[in-house]
Amino acid sequence: MTREIVYIVVEIAIGFGSGLMVGAGFVAFLTVLGIIPRLVQLSKSIDWMKHYQASVIVGALLGTYLSFTEWTLNLPVYILGFWGLLHGIFIGMLAAALTEVLNVFPILMKRLGIDKELLWLLMAIVIGKITGSLFHWIIFVDIF
């Protein structure tokens, strides 16, 4: 009985410590990429800065909770579609911020010698991402 309690306490400590490390890494990743300040700069909404930060924290906590519990949300399809749209926007912004920080596109364009075709490259990436996502959701996901 005592040994089981020790195992449970150790598992809780390891889980909590691991969660703190992953969460700190996620926040550091967002900080290095500067997503929230960039959002504020682009949208000219400095008054909403605390709301941006709170939404990232609440979203991370809610996502973690929903990932590790048996609890599910039985929502209508249009709400799930909106939820998926928000996830797509977040992932797209994360990818765009990462490429912006690393200057991937300017370096790639200079190496390939096609500096003037940057718009076409970006449009190809956007259309490819949209087409791939639609293909996945229409073909592989059984919504109804």
Image: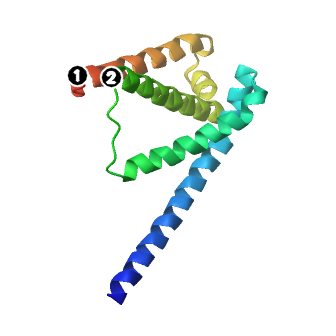
Can you tell which mark lies on residue 77? 2
Q: Position of residue 20 (x, y in %)?
A: 56, 60
For disc 1, the marked residue is 139
Can you tell which mark lies on residue 12? none
State the image quarter where residue 55 is shown.
top right
Q: Residues within 10 Å of mark 1 (few under 14, many from 20)?
A: few
- Look at label 2 and name its amino acid: Val
Residue under the point 62% across and 23% down: 110
72 sits left or right of 113 in the view: left
- Look at label 1 and name its amino acid: Ile
Choose the circle earlier in sequence order: 1 or 2: 2
74 sits left or right of 104 in the view: left
Q: Is residue 6 above or below residue 115?
A: below
7 sits left or right of 46 in the view: left
- Which quadrant does the C terminus fall into? top left
Closest to the observer, 132 or 62: 62
Q: Position of residue 135 (x, y in %)?
A: 29, 20
Q: Nearer the viewer, mark 1 or mark 2?
A: 2
Residue under the point 47% across and 19% down: 125
Closest to the observer, 69 or 119: 69
Residue under the point 36% across and 88% down: 2
Closest to the observer, 122 or 13: 13
Q: Position of residue 19 (x, y in %)?
A: 50, 59
- Which quadrant does the N terminus fall into? bottom left
Q: Is residue 84 above or below residue 10?
A: above
